[in-house]
Amino acid sequence: MLANDFILNTRISGRMSYSSPLRYPGGKGKLAGFFSQLITANGLEGGTYIEPFAGGAGVAMSLLAEGKVGNIVINDIDRPIHAFWQAVLDRPEDMARKIRETAVTVEEWRKQKKIQRAPDANVFDLGFSTFFLNRTNRSGVLDGGPIGGLEQKGTYKIDARYNPERLAGIVEHIGSLSEHIQLYGTDAEDFIRKVLPDQDRDSTLVYLDPPYYQKGAYLYMNYYSHWDHLRLSEAVDECAHHWVVSYDDDPAIRDFYRPYRRREFCLDYSAYERRKGREIMFFSDELEVPDDLLLPGQRDNLSLLEDTRPFVQTTLI
Ligand SMILES: C[S@@+](CC[C@H](N)C(=O)[O-])C[C@H]1O[C@@H](n2cnc3c(N)ncnc32)[C@H](O)[C@@H]1O
C-alpha cells in the first residue's frame, strides 16, 4: 500500500484517525498538517522527527507514513504505553492478529484490566492490554470504565471505538515502517540531555507535548508537578535542536517560556473539558514559522476562539 493510500484509508466516517492506533486525551494528531508544513518551511524533509512525550504519537506516525520525514524517534516513560509500541514494532503481525481475533466484550475488558495490573505481564500481553483498554475505555483514559458502562446500558457500546480491521491495518503498516522508528522508554529530561545530542542538529525537529500543566494529573498516569515543568523548560532552553513545545495555556507556562515566540490555538477535544481547550505553542529561535502557517483555531481565526457556546459532547474520542 502506498503511503498516500494509507493516509486516505485512515479516514473513516469523515473523521481522520491520524495514523495512530491509540486514542489520546488531547492527542495532537490534528496538528500533523501543521508540522508537515513547518518541516517544509525549514527544509527538514527527509530528516528526523522526534517526540520525547510520544503517547499516541499521531503526528510522528502521520509524518512518517506520508514520507515527509525519513525517521522518527518516539519516547514515553509510561510502561504500558512503551510496551504497546514495543509490541507493535517487534511483533506487528501478532498484534494485528490479536486485534482482529479478540472479542470486544466486558468479560474480555475485565481480563485485560487484570493483565494491565499484573506486575509480571510480558511486553506483548501488556502492550495489547494497553491497546484494548485504550480503545474500549471512556475517553481512552486507562483507568476509566468501559464505554457504555459495565452493564452496557449507555448509548455507545464497548466496541464503539474498536474497528478491528482498520486498527489491525494501521498496526501492520506501522510494522512495515519499523526500521525507520526508534523507541525509547525513558524520562523526557534524560532523553533531551542524553539521547538528543546524538541526533543530527540540522535535519531534526523535536516536538515536546508534555502532560498538561493544569489537568495532567487527571489525564495521564505519569504527571508533572510545577517544578517538573520548570525543570523541563530549563532542559528545553539548553536544547540545540529545532524544537516546538505545546501546552495548555497557563500563566506559569507562559512565564517559563517567555523568551520564545508563541502562538495560541485550540483543539476541539472532549475529555475532562466542557469547552474547547486553549493551548499554546512555543518555538525555538532558529525555527522559521511562516505567518500564513496557521494552527487550528489560532487567534487570527477569531470565529473559532470566540465561540463561547456551551460545548456539547457528540462524539467519543
Ligand atoms: C500529552 S501526552 C502526549 C500526547 C501525544 N502528543 C499524542 O498526540 O498522543 C504526554 C505523554 O507524556 C508521557 N510522559 C509523562 N511524563 C513523562 C516523562 N517524565 N518522560 C517521558 N514521557 C512522559 C505520558 O505517558 C503521556 O503519554
Image (tube, rainbow, N blue to C red):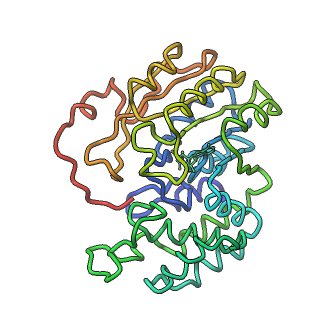
Q: Which of 129 and 206 lies nearest the eye of the viewer?
A: 129
User: Residue reaching furthest left?
Assistant: 309
On-image quarter of the C terminus: bottom left
On-image quarter of the N terminus: bottom right
Q: Which of 237 and 29 lies nearest the eye of the viewer?
A: 237
Q: State the residue at coordinates (49%, 52%).
A: 220
Q: State the residue at coordinates (72%, 21%).
A: 240
Question: Can you say whether 224 is above or below 154 in the image?
Answer: above
Left or right? Give the position of 137 relative to 238: left
Q: Position of residue 68 (x, y in %)?
A: 66, 41
Q: Position of residue 123 (x, y in %)?
A: 71, 68
Q: Which of 115 and 56 lies nearest the eye of the viewer?
A: 115
Question: Can you say whether 127 is above or below 62 in the image?
Answer: below
Total marks drawn?
0
Q: Position of residue 267 (x, y in %)?
A: 38, 41
Q: State the residue at coordinates (56%, 53%).
A: 56
Left or right? Give the position of 276 relative to 292: left
Q: State the residue at coordinates (59%, 58%).
A: 5
Q: Position of residue 13 (x, y in %)?
A: 38, 63
Question: Can you say whether 183 is above or below 174 in the image?
Answer: above
User: Residue reaching furthest top?
Assistant: 259
Left or right? Give the position of 44 relative to 290: right
